[in-house]
Image (cartoon, grey):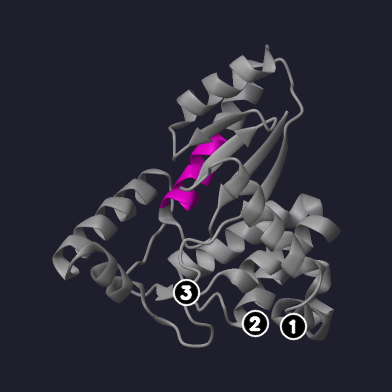
Amino acid sequence: MQVEIVSDVVCPWCYIGKRRFEAALALLQREGPEVEISVTHRSFQLDPTAPLGAPTPVRDAYAKKFGGSERAERILATVTEAAASEGLDFRMDIALRANTLRAHRVLAWVGMEYSARQVAVNDAIMAAYFTHGKDIADPTTLIDCVVSGVPELAIEAGRLHDIIIGEHDDLAAKVTSDLEWAAARDITAVPTFVLNDSLAVPGAQDAPTLARIMRRMLTR
């Protein structure tokens, strides 16, 4: 089964949903029989207007978007609690609003060149944003995330920098293609899990629910 995860690396429910999806896969494997599931991440931008090179506190952006600091703090507290229940340490007090285009370029490149490592690099980028308060639009941060997931690239920082900051190449086309792919399927919220390009499962569903849906798809 092919699972395509449409998400943005600054979406808290995408990170939570990713953990729940991984737990769902573990449930499927335990219940048997063994199945082959291929996972691909597709780009989505929740905040394409976020500037490059000018990170600001996420708390300020939430306050502006949701009508004030009090409501923003409640929302952030809710997602932080949900993340903790999945073993994730959210530090939204230090998180920085950032444009995610470069991060998606990186994930597109890793997906093409080192597909088995895309999940690890995606995890590293999300941890940099949600836990460590890093600017994930900064090439240095992204290089560290790539090397975390693909250690053999540690000696290729210059090459990675060029990949990250490039604008008019196949990576830009790949990100644009992902955005168009989601739009063609009326995907307007993330995370969304698309199974065999025929069933879209929206939201950070709990692991048993996801496992049940995937099991049904596998037995069709």
Query: How crowded is the residue under tag 1: few (<14 C-alpha within 10 Å), some, or many (20+)?
Result: some
Which mark lies nearer to you, 3 or 1? 3
Residue 82: x, y in percent?
A: 34, 46
Residue at the image point whose x is 69% and y is 77% from the top: 143
Q: Is mark 1 on a helix, strand or loop?
A: helix
The amino acid beneath tag 1 is His
Which quarter of the figure has residue 94? Answer: bottom left
Furthest-top residue in this view: 219
Q: Give 96 or 168, whichever is nearer the viewer.
A: 168
The residue carrying mark 1 is 161
The amino acid beneath tag 3 is Thr
Q: Is mark 3 on a helix, strand or loop?
A: loop
The quadrant of the image that shows the C terminus is top right
* Cα gap from disc 3 to disc 2, whole angstroms: 19 Å
Q: Earlier in the sequence, mark 1 or mark 2?
A: 2
- Predominant secondary structure, magenta span: helix
Note whether 22 is above or below 73 in the view shown: above
**Is label 1 in contact with label 2 (beta carbons under 8 Å)?**
yes
The quadrant of the image that shows the N terminus is top right
* Cα gap from disc 1 to disc 2, whole angstroms: 6 Å
The residue carrying mark 2 is 139
* Left or right of 18 in this view: 153: right
Residue at the image point whose x is 36% and y is 44% from the top: 85
